[in-house]
Image (cartoon, coloured by chain):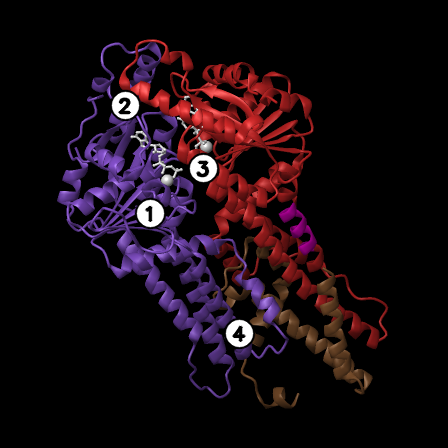
Amino acid sequence: MSLREVFESEPDRRYVMFGGKGGLGKTTLSATSAFWLASHGKRVLLFSVDPQASLSDIFQRDIFGKGPVSIMENLWAQEVDADRRIREYQEEIRKKILDMYGFDKVPEEIDNYIAAASAEPAMEESAIFDAVVDIIVQGDYDYYIYDLVPLGHALYYLSMAKVYDEWINKITKLREDMREYDKLAATLRREEKVQEDQILGELTYIKDRINASSRILTDRKRTAFFFVVVPEEMIILDTQKAAALFAKFDVPISGYIVNRVLPPDLGQGKIPPYLRNRIAMQQKYMEQIRVTFGDEIRSYVPEMERDITGLPMIERLAQRLFVDGGGAR
Amino acid sequence: MTDESKERGGLMKVFKDVVYGMASHEMTRHAVRTRASMEHLFILITMGDLLGVPILPPYYSLRLLPYVTPQIAGWKRRMLRERDLTDVLG
Amino acid sequence: MTTDVRIDTSMAKYLAEHPGAHYLFFGGKGGVGKTAMAGATALWLAKQGKRTLLASTNPVHSLSGLLGQDVSGGHTGVAGVANLWAYEIDTRETIERSKNEIREKIQWFLKFADISTKADDFVESATMNPAFEESAMFENMVEMMLKKEYDVYVFDTAPTANARRLLGMSKVYSLWVDKMLRSREEARTLREMLSFTKKKEADPLLEYLLGFRERMGQARRLLTDAEKTAFFFVTLPEALPIAVITRFIGWFHEFGIPIGGVIVNMVLDRAALGADVPEFVLNRMQMQDDHMKTIREKFDGRVRAIVPLFDEEVRGTAMLGRAAAALFA
Ligand SMILES: Nc1ncnc2c1ncn2[C@@H]1O[C@H](COP(=O)(O)OP(=O)(O)OP(=O)(O)O)[C@@H](O)[C@H]1O
Ligand SMILES: Nc1ncnc2c1ncn2[C@@H]1O[C@H](COP(=O)(O)OP(=O)(O)OP(=O)(O)O)[C@@H](O)[C@H]1O
Ligand SMILES: [Mg+2]
Ligand SMILES: [Mg+2]
């Protein structure tokens, strides 16, 4: 099945990701797919949590930390600014304290504690994790395209959900035990009912958030995850290893895109030996890719004569990714 | 999940065994105390860094802060107070 | 080769001028050749008679693949090369160690504060934090740096986002530990106020925190010492990798991490291409020329080497030798 057919035949797969080792073209193919879907009338949000802000570079405008920015009709792009997110989170907590107790000022020691929280080592990554939850649970775009960070880091986000889930289960259990004692004390005192534990309510809310993202990202019906590979030996090996790891996190792998294939007609003419060697090397590994990934290959994308920035170049690549290269079988 | 609820049942059973035979008001007092001690533990493991206990509280623990805000000052004092004779006899 | 980029201070000259440079880092966008350049540098240094350790802080290690031998277990001598060892940092042990340390500290505190509830199960939750992985990587790296078992340490880092966090860790942790120390001081004052016996007590938490601060301080001093440390940025003559290292250099400037310079990798070698060059290659060469101009403007005087695109992957010590020859030309 070609990439185009995957999108056409499975319209419910609204969460789309391109994963793979560093620099193989994840951002490029994410932007290209977003462009293609948007130009076919779908409302698309393309987002990234990568502080290296590649979407700004590929669209040649600064969109970092500005929320969803309109790129063209039906296409929005967003780059999450973790620092800003942390500041908003701190503000949210302060406001909640003021509202709950009708204070007009957050008590100093509490305020200091909130302020110092931004120095917590896991804060940035966690804020990013939480921001992604916000983006994907809103659900008002037709497509969400998540431009992933390189492999190791992407796995880190996935495992984060697991760590948080274990943490929240433990804390919740303690809180539930506490409620048992409340109930007991109340029974002994012959009181009617125990006061509702607001903390338990909040813990449930947190648990829901934590699991929302992994729930969506591992949902076979709604999610499509494509690996990007290039015809090189190490990359093929690493991609196979990575696919196994992602499978452990139940990420539904929907196929492989082979990127940066040297145009085969190049080999016809008189070419310098350097290029001849590279073409020969690629041909060898193309064969291996066919054997290894077989009918899981969704598209072959040629190496373009220049790097991909700006909409006209993206449009040209879209043609290659969805039309020319889509004949992949 | 079932494991956990079983454990909880276990905990309550131990508790009931302990208090078996106590007068009702004593039992109530015991339950309230245990509850208070757990509250201390709760704040400690979610916000122990307030007292310089070197835990890295996860991002989400900050969400719990508003609910324990009024208890923090008292909690600090309780955590740092020396046990005196009245505690022991208590 | 594109020659309009000046190289005043080459790699070789830089290292000659910085004889005390014991810690060399290689970073940049995904797939630009960080591992290849780190490997080539380590090989070159070993051949100069320096005892060299090539270490990877990338959670997705690739040194074993680069060298064709398993270097994951510990410092492993590289086959056929005197003075060269390689190691893919393994964080599992360190993570367990820091978790135990935290468990101990909490147990101590529980006793100290006389919390009698059975707590073991819940103490576990305090060791659940996604930051452990990263901080363990950092601690391992620092530990190695402080041991000074080798003349030179060459670090192959993960793509930008990760490396930024890793090296920024000493700063974040310093902030964190300062905050903790302040809380601890406050706690002690309060404790003394509340004490009726007024006896002096040992405080293992304070000792732990002071020890930690000392380690972080040492790490920070090493990482910001321009005599000892240098960070090299690898880029391609393409828009996105250039944009990425531009931001990266800005951050490192803020952190005070000394910048060794910029290495431009995978440059098409005009001379080697010969006369009859197909249009595709001409176009790519044109693109590279355009970006070389940007590189000249942005990194003037800081480019240390221009490394050609070879006709095969950089793998194995023979290829690394070729890369080293180009890098230290
Ligand atoms: N088919 C192609 N033809 C030519 N250049 C390409 C092609 N695909 C990607 N590139 C170029 O390769 C470089 C890396 O691509 P990109 O930034 O999309 O990779 P990535 O996987 O997102 O990287 P990272 O892991 O750093 O996020 C960019 O300069 C991009 O323009
Ligand atoms: N000058 C070069 N000529 C030809 N191939 C090269 C050159 N430099 C690197 N390569 C090849 O490019 C690929 C990427 O290089 P490498 O693995 O060193 O990049 P990296 O920046 O470490 O990637 P990652 O971000 O995944 O860690 C490898 O297959 C490597 O062999
Ligand atoms: Mg990218
Ligand atoms: Mg690498």
- Does residue C15 appear anywhere in the picture? yes
Is B90 magenta? The answer is: no
> Please, which chain is the residue tagged with disc 1 on?
C
Q: Chain B appears what colour? A: brown
Answer whether labels 1 and 4 touch (C-beta < 8 Å): no
For ligand 2, the image quadrant comes to top left
Vertical comparison of C102 with A308: above or below: below
Callout 2: SS: helix
> Please, which chain is the residue tagged with disc 3 on?
A
Q: Chain C appears what colour? A: purple
Q: What's the amino acid at mark 3?
A: Leu
Label 2, on which residue? C292
- Does residue A94 appear anywhere in the picture? no
Could you tell whether C34 is left or right of B47 in the image?
Answer: left
Marks 2 and 1 share the same chain: yes
Answer whether labels 1 and 3 touch (C-beta < 8 Å): no
The stretch in magenta equals A202-211
Label 1, on which residue? C255
Q: What's the amino acid at mark 2?
A: Met
Q: Tell me where residue C210 appears, x and y as whole percent.
A: 37, 68
Q: Nearer the viewer, mark 4 or mark 3?
A: 3
Q: What's the amino acid at mark 4?
A: Gln
Label 1 and label 4: CA atoms lie apart by: 36 Å
Q: Tell me where residue C224 appears, x and y as whole percent.
A: 27, 51
Label 4, on which residue? C107
Q: Nearer the viewer, mark 2 or mark 1?
A: 2
Tell me which chain appears red: A
Label 3, on which residue? A237
Q: Tell me where residue C258 appears, x and y as whole percent.
A: 26, 45
Vertical comparison of C196 with A142: above or below: below
